[in-house]
Image (cartoon, rainbow, N blue to C red):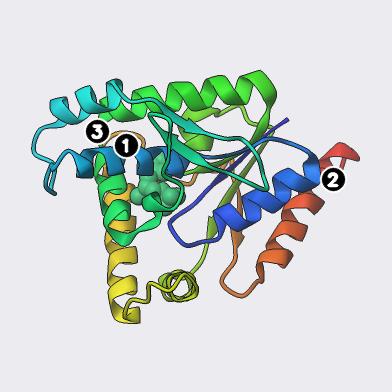
Amino acid sequence: MIVAIDGPSGVGKSTVGRAVAAHLGLPYLDTGAMYRAVGLAVLRRGLRLPLADAAEVGRIAGALDVTVTGSATDGRTFLDGEDVSADIRSPEVSRYASAVAAVPAVRRRLAARQRELALAGGGVLEGRDIGTRVVPEADFKFFLTARPDVRARRRWEELHAKGTPQPLERVLAETVARDRADETRADSPLRCDESYRVVDTSELSAREVVERLLAIVAGAAAGG
Ligand code: DC
């Protein structure tokens, strides 16, 4: 079984995706972590934003070994063998991830790898283009949404809990900027279509979202 979960940043895809995968006994793939790992590598090479040379970014990405472990409980991201799970979560890497995600050569490579993993073992995949490009034939396609202020607050709480607080206005501005970049890039932008089930999570807890998704999956299994 393949479950695609797409939506903008801070909507709760990871929390929900992990729980859904654990309940269904499926591998879990955080595809954003792959873009983040490439973003981190590009940042470490000293390239500045906005990225001026897409060909160079493509070359850097092409030589990297990016591995994301497919476990729902202990997802880790490795860049050329180094565990970068914590490093890829900084606001700076978020900006680089969004920038490298607009480079077609990077998308081609990562999307092909993601598709391979999904077809090999099934799974819950979360990202921006899972249902539109990576596995359009997924058994279930969910599009999570939430108001930008709600998403920014969730992200703000996360940063606070991690001990790296940021002003809320700044988190909101960055959330909106990243949405815009992800929705307007030419290559596989974040886009919802009628093949998705849309779930607005603004007023729901993560647990309620998980229950809703699992009910839809169970309903389909029961023929409903
Ligand atoms: O989900 P996230 O915030 O970890 O994703 C990081 C960036 O990667 C985000 O700005 C959009 C991009 N991304 C993408 O373009 N396609 C995906 N399937 C997943 C993430």
Is 160 above or below relative to 2?
A: below
Mark 1 lies on a secondary structure that is helix
Left or right: 75 as drawn, with respect to 67: right
Residue 103 is tagged as 3
Residue in the image at 30% along x and 80% along y: 169
Q: Which residue is mark 1?
A: 38
The answer to whether residue 181 is left or right of residue 122 is left
In which quadrant of the rendered view does residue 149 lie?
Answer: bottom left
User: Decide: marks 3, 2 in contact (CB < 8 A)?
Assistant: no
Q: Which amino acid, mark 2? A: Ala
Q: Residue at x 68, y 35 (%)?
A: 27
Q: Is residue 124 visible?
A: yes
Query: Are the two marked residues, 1 and 3, in contact with CB atoms closer than 8 angstroms?
Result: no
Say which quarter of the image contains residue 90: bottom left
Look at label 1 and name its amino acid.
Val
Q: In the image shown, does 185 or 106 lie closer to the viewer?
A: 106
Q: Residues within 10 Å of mark 3 (few under 14, many from 20)?
A: some
* Image location of residue 91, percent across then percent down: 31, 61
Residue on which the image places disc 2: 218
Other-residue count near label 1 (Cα within 10 Å), few / some / many at <14 / 14–19 / ≥20: many
Calculate the distance from the C-alpha at mark 2 to the C-alpha at mark 1. Answer: 36 Å
Report the label total: 3
Q: Work out whether residue 182 or residue 191 is closer to the camera in this orientation and state it.
A: 182
Pointer 3 or 2: first along the chain: 3
**Type of the residue with mark 3:** Val
Residue at position x 36%, y 40% in the image? 37
Q: Nearer the viewer, mark 2 or mark 1?
A: 1
